[in-house]
Image (cartoon, rainbow, N blue to C red):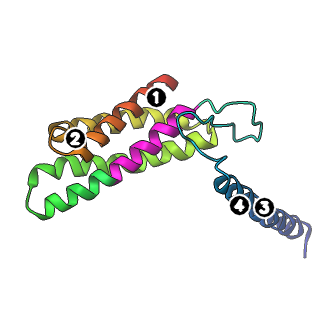
Amino acid sequence: MNRREMISALGLTAVGAAAPSAASALTHQIKNGSASTQKNAPVVASSGNTSAPNPYANCIITAKNCVASAEICLTKMVELLAKGEETFFECAVATRQMLPICEALLSLSAQESPLTTGIAKLSIKSCTECAAACKPHIDHHPSCQECYLSCLACIKSCRAIT
């Protein structure tokens, strides 16, 4: 084994040793309720400094809500489309396009990534399109209304950081 191979093997061993303890810590936080991101619960910095709030805390909350409400809305739209209600096609397309963008926003915000502001700009665009597609249905379908409102909230939180 040469020097590079040995350094690489040691690095992989260190990563392998750290991963279970990090997963265990996260599981402990979730079980004890300390990993909550509810509106009243502070979201802490990923650096481990629990006194420093995550600057993207609002994006974490709104992106999470956007993803959850979009999944529910999309499920309802698929049911309606299967029944032949074609007016939901545009809404389903916009929702499907918004979902991976807001999932990326959630992940990058939680990591305090420098890429967060870039994905936030794209989130504004995708949430605007999704909200516009949902708007005609909000008076008749609660899931569309919830998706619409969560998109508006996500847009607001993204604008605050861009």
- As drawn, the label of residue 133 is none
Q: Is residue 49 magenta?
A: no
Closer to the chain start, of discs 4 and 2, is 4
Q: Is residue 59 magenta?
A: yes
Say what secondary structure mark 3 lies in.
helix
Residue underneath mark 1: 157
Report the residue at 63% width, 43% height from top.
111
Q: Is residue 7 above or below residue 116?
A: below
Cα distance, mark 1 to mark 4?
29 Å
Residue 130 appears anywhere in the view: no
Closer to the chain start, of discs 2 and 1, is 2
Front residue of this view, candidates 31 and 72: 31
Q: Which residues are magenta?
A: 56-71
Closer to the chain start, of discs 2 and 3, is 3
Q: Is residue 55 above or below residue 148?
A: above
Q: Are marks 2 and 1 in contact (CB under 8 Å)?
A: no
Q: Are marks 2 and 3 in contact (CB under 8 Å)?
A: no
Say what secondary structure mark 2 lies in.
helix
Residue 34 in the image, given as x and y percentages of width and height: 67, 46
Residue underneath mark 3: 21
Cα distance, mark 3 to mark 4?
5 Å
Residue underneath mark 4: 23
Cα distance, mark 2 to mark 1?
19 Å
The amino acid pointed to by label 3 is Ser
Residue underneath mark 2: 134
